[in-house]
Image: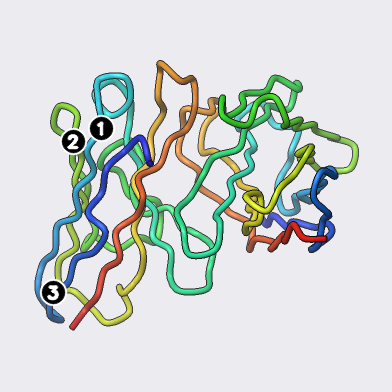
Amino acid sequence: QLQLQESGPGLVKPSETLSLTCTVSGGSISSNAYYWGWIRQPPGKGLEWIGSIYYSGTTYYNPSLKSRVTISIDTSKSQFSLNLSSVTAADTAMYYCGRHIHSSPVAAIGYWGQGTLVTVSS
Amino acid sequence: QSVLTQSPSVSAAPGQKVTISCSGSSSNIGNNYVSWYQQLPGTAPKLLIYDNNKRPSGIPDRFSGSKSGTSATLDITGLQTGDEADYYCGTWDSSLSAVVFGGGTKLTVL
């Protein structure tokens, strides 16, 4: 059974960079069959897609976050990562990693990690 | 402000049927597949419907999806108290080149 687990600091200071890692087990992150993505959800609010990455390193980003986001992949470690720079309180959210069901970011997200809460505060 | 529009809340009695709607435009729902997600309180979202009307393995046939033009609907029949959750629609927006979600609909089973 595929499992995804987010990890990283739960508290980040304003203006700093938020860095999270998603570790994949029970399946190959190197498969050409899927895209891998990051999604966030501010407390009490809806879902917001951050971006997605293919095993080859091809990325798609949310235009509203593109200038601050970098998603990378390390197939040797079965991990992909999120960096979000210049954070503010508005970036406080539950951050989820997930796997799309096909080899396209257009596809639905079929597997989700449990999420990790990141708070931006000094 | 979400790209896709959903009613904030809907309610129905156990055993009844409820319809949750999602409205978009030609750049998203009108020309791309729609998916639906269920988020139970305190948990991660779960895929209920993909490609407009397909159910992943393990999703009961009480859940069904459809699409017409620039709108999509999720039907839930035989409502159970365990169906109380937030439901989100999602799709790709070709103009934005981005995954977009609706604002979510909170289902209350009275």
Q: Quote the CA–CA distance across marks 2 and 3.
A: 22 Å
Which one is earlier in the sequence, the residue at label 3 or at label 1?
3
Q: Which of A1 and A65 is in front in this view?
A: A65
Evaluate whether label 2 is on the same chain as label 1. Answer: yes
- Name which residue lies at 45% across and 39% down: A108
The chain carrying label 2 is: B
The chain carrying label 3 is: B
Q: What element carries label 1?
A: loop
Q: What element carries label 3?
A: strand
Callout 2 amino acid: Ser
Residue A111, position in %: x, y?
56, 51
Rendered position, A56 above or below A15 = above
Which of the 4 image quarters holds residue B95?
top left
- Name which residue lies at 34% across and 46% down: B89
**Label 2 crowd bin: few (<14), some (14–19), many (20+), radius 10 Å:** some
Q: What element carries label 2?
A: strand
Q: Do the residues labelled 2 and 1 touch (CB within 8 Å)?
A: yes
Residue A121, position in %: x, y?
77, 60
Q: Do the residues labelled 3 and 1 touch (CB within 8 Å)?
A: no
List the single residue furthest toward the top.
B95
Type of colouring? rainbow
Rendered position, B65 above or below A30 = below
Residue underneath mark 3: B12
Callout 1 amino acid: Gly
Residue underneath mark 2: B71
